[in-house]
Amino acid sequence: MNILSIQSWVAYGHVGNASAIFPLQRLGAEVWGIHTVQFSNHTGYGAWRGQVFDAGLVRDCVQGIEERGALARCDAVLSGYMGGAEIGEAILHAVARARAHNPAALYCCDPVIGDVGRGVFVRPGIPEFLRDRAIPMADIATPNRFELEWLTGREVRDLASAKAAMAALQAMGPRCVMLTSCDVAGVGEGEIALLAAEGGRFWRVLTPRLPISVNGAGDAIAALFLFHRLASGEAGRALSLAASSVFGLLRRTAEAGSREILTVAAQEEFVSPSRLFPAEPL
């Protein structure tokens, strides 16, 4: 399996490509990582050093990969946080080039816009770019609840409205949608729900709520869901395996009291989750 992942990179900690690439490699995927930024650490610390790369660098790296003849073997393109619309256009150019060489190549878009309680935290124009340009090109989308509501203009209050919003997002482009967090009516107080939709079917996984708030977990679960969806062809199985691995990762992180997710220390969770949460049809 070959995945082209275009995301941010941090030297310290695990977000963006630093959260997505290693789990994919641990599962046996070949990952071609192109970084949109090189920062010392994630911005959640309030201070960081490094540089934001321009769209020309992304296009140049994609062209170099294409010149090696590798895009014919590209199974999927994965994107996450986009620093600007110009970076977004470069990512969509990469998707187009990958599909030109391999029409079966999938595009998994993690539409990073914001979160409940924080609102929109990306630059102006990015949410609209994701809605109008990226989502229509995507085969798979992995929004959180806030992002699903923003992209579809639908309020998610309970499981029924979550399913309706996911179906609305599917109608915009991606045939497969994973909702990475669904804390709504119908979900137990000590639980977190994750949902997936494809082919008119819906699945739910419930995991215990952990006393932890860290950066990078969304990047990891998007990558894991893409891998397992490619490997199995089944959204329900992909949801179960991805959710189980990330729960194990976060449990280990919470037990250690770490500010950063323990991507390396908990790597066995990617291959063999210590606790498997089944996906139940809805």
Image: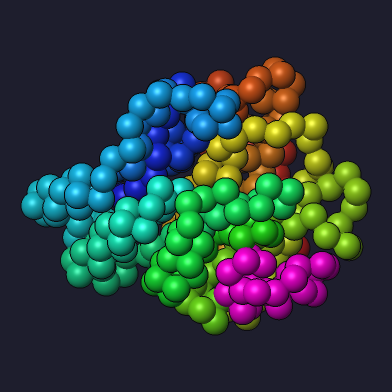
Q: Is residue 188 above or below residue 95?
A: above
Residue 155 painted magenta: yes
Q: Is residue 273 above or below residue 145?
A: above
In the rendered image, which quarter is residue 237 located in?
A: bottom right
From this viewpoint, is residue 69 visible?
A: yes
Q: Nearer the viewer, residue 112 or 269?
A: 112
Q: Does residue 168 appear to the left or right of 161 in the view shown? A: left
Q: Which residues are magenta?
A: 148-169
In the rendered image, which quarter is residue 74 located in?
A: bottom left
Q: How is the image coloured?
A: rainbow
Q: Give the residue at x 75% y 57%.
A: 182
From this viewpoint, is residue 29 visible?
A: no
Residue 172 painted magenta: no
Image location (x, y in percent) of residue 113: 55, 55
Q: Does residue 267 appear to the left or right of 189 in the view shown? A: left
Q: Does residue 96 appear to the left or right of 189 in the view shown? A: left
Q: Give the residue at x 19% y 60%.
A: 72
Q: Does residue 2 appear to the left or right of 14 in the view shown? A: left
Q: Give the residue at x 26% y 45%.
A: 54
Q: Which residue occupies the extreme front position in the image?
A: 124
Image location (x, y in percent) of residue 225: 53, 53
Image location (x, y in percent) of residue 166: 64, 72
Image location (x, y in percent) of residue 157: 82, 67
Image quarter in which the C terminus is found: bottom right
Q: Give the residue at x 40% y 71%.
A: 133
Q: Nearer the viewer, residue 187 or 36?
A: 36
Main SS category, magenta section: helix
